Image (spheres, rainbow, N blue to C red):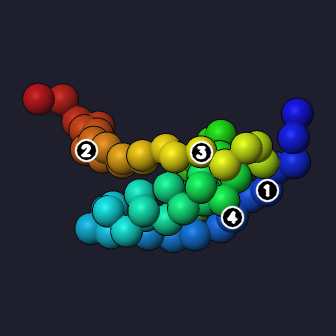
Amino acid sequence: MGDTKTVFRLYGAWNGEKEAAWLGGMSRAGWHLISCGLGYYRFEKAEPAEYIYEADFAILSGGSE
């Protein structure tokens, strides 16, 4: 397993394109996304590559319909 790093970064759904471009830049620099959560991204160092990232947001309902 290569080197890993965690980056803490908050963003809003309205900035999805900007965030996707940032993630693509990370991959071109050799840091590939391996997991993410609320406010953090975890990357693994590998050969630089061209990846395209896209976020998909869903609204979850807790009530009965």
Q: CA distance from mark 2 to mark 3?
A: 32 Å
The residue identified by callout 1 is 5
The residue identified by callout 3 is 49
Residue found at x 78% / y 48%: 45
Whether residues under marks 2 and 3 lie with C-beta atoms below 8 angstroms apart, the answer is: no
Among the 4 quarters of the image, the one containing residue 26 = bottom right
User: Closer to the N terminus: mark 1 or mark 2?
Assistant: 1
The residue identified by callout 2 is 59
Whether residues under marks 4 and 2 lie with C-beta atoms below 8 angstroms apart, the answer is: no
Residue found at x 50% / y 55%: 24
Q: Nearer the viewer, mark 1 or mark 2?
A: 1
Q: As rendered, which of 63 and 26 lies closer to the eye?
A: 26
Q: Nearer the viewer, mark 4 or mark 2?
A: 4
Q: Tell me the amino acid under the disc marked 1.
A: Lys
Q: CA distance from mark 1 to mark 3?
A: 17 Å
- On residue 7, the disc is 4
Is any atom of residue 38 visible in this view?
no
Whether residues under marks 4 and 1 lie with C-beta atoms below 8 angstroms apart, the answer is: yes
Q: Tell me the amino acid under the disc marked 4.
A: Val
- On residue 15, the disc is none
SS at mark 1 in the image: strand
Q: Tell me the amino acid under the disc marked 3.
A: Ala
SS at mark 3 in the image: loop
Residue found at x 58% / y 69%: 9
SS at mark 4 in the image: strand
